[in-house]
Amino acid sequence: MSPSSAPLPWAPCPCPPAEPFTADSLTTHWQRLHRGDAEALPADPAVLEAWVRFHNGDFQGATHAGLALGALGITVANKATCIHARYVEPSEPQRLALWLEAAERARVQQLSKPQDAAAWYWQGYALGRYSQGISVAKALAKGLGSQVRQALQTTIDREPRHADAHLALANFHAEVIDQVGELIGGMTHGARKQTGLDLYQRAMALNPDSAITLAEVANGLVMLEGPKATEQATRLLQQAAAFRPLDAMERLYVESARMALDS
């Protein structure tokens, strides 16, 4: 039985929103919460309810609700699975399994909805996080780097306003260069420092008032620029740590930024 459909409960989200969402309140805040992924407000009430679960930090409930809806719910299921795996799941093998599940669901989603940016994004995101889990060097040797880069670039081609895809693709360039250097990274895997910096800048332009953007850019700048970026990265993390989060995902990013500053 796959991890996301197993009867055992997932670890609860440690950072639920201060004010739980309802369908009405989520509709009110939808544009603000989804500026990063450019996801449209769902017309189907059942899909919206699955998103309510997600924003309230019930990632397992959101995943199950999304999968029960079939094609309409794959995106919310994948996002809930990936965020749970990234920030909540304590087991490394379980995290890896969840990312592979989400990546495979997204791949299948692409077959029926090739123009859906979310189908490409969650494949790229999940494979990127999986690659970090097994080590970027191992992932590159397996050929995962090209899959991640292609999926995220396709996301941007489908939806140029997708700030999170710009962040994730920038992270690809930064992590490859951090692991194997700019020369080998560029020649072998298409990773380039300036491309990464440009993508981070574009993400900041698209979604500047976001703890997610601030924290990801801070981390990426250090990988691309080294010690000379420390001061700027610290300022960005301080802004992220001071951010007033609306939902569970934003709270997880804010707490992560605070922990990074304390380390």
Image (cartoon, helix red, strand yellow):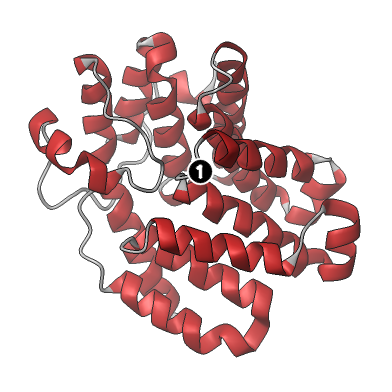
Rendered residue at 70%/69% (across/down):
194
In the picture of the structure, the residue carrying the numbered disc 1 is 160
Choose top left, top right, bottom left or bottom right for residue 187: bottom right
**Where does the N terminus fall, quadrant-wise?**
top right
In the rendered structure, the answer to whether residue 17 lies left or right of residue 103 reads: left
Q: Can residue 88 be seen by looking at this rendering?
A: yes
In percent of width and height, residue 170 lies at 61, 58
**Across the whole image, how many numbered discs are drawn on residues?**
1
At 54% from the left and 63% from the top, the residue drawn is 200
Q: Secondary structure at mark 1?
A: loop
**In which quadrant of the rendered view does residue 37 lie?**
top left
Query: Quick check: 93 left or right of 181?
Result: left
Q: Residue at x 56, y 21 (%)?
A: 105
In the rendered image, residue 73, in percent from the top left (x then y), is placed at 38, 18
Residue 235 position by quadrant: bottom left
Q: Could you say which is closer to the camera, residue 228 or residue 128?
A: 228
Dot 1, how many residues are within 10 Å of its Cα: few (below 14), some (14-19), or many (20+)?
some
**Residue 260 in the figure: left or right of residue 193:** left
- Taking 203 as reference, is 161 above or below it? above
Q: Position of residue 74 (x, y in %)?
A: 44, 21
Residue 96, visible in the rendered structure: no
Does residue 178 lie above or below 121 as drawn? below
User: Where in the figure is residue 123, as x and y percent of width and height?
Assistant: 60, 33
Rendered residue at 68%/62% (across/down): 195
Q: Label 1 amino acid? A: Pro
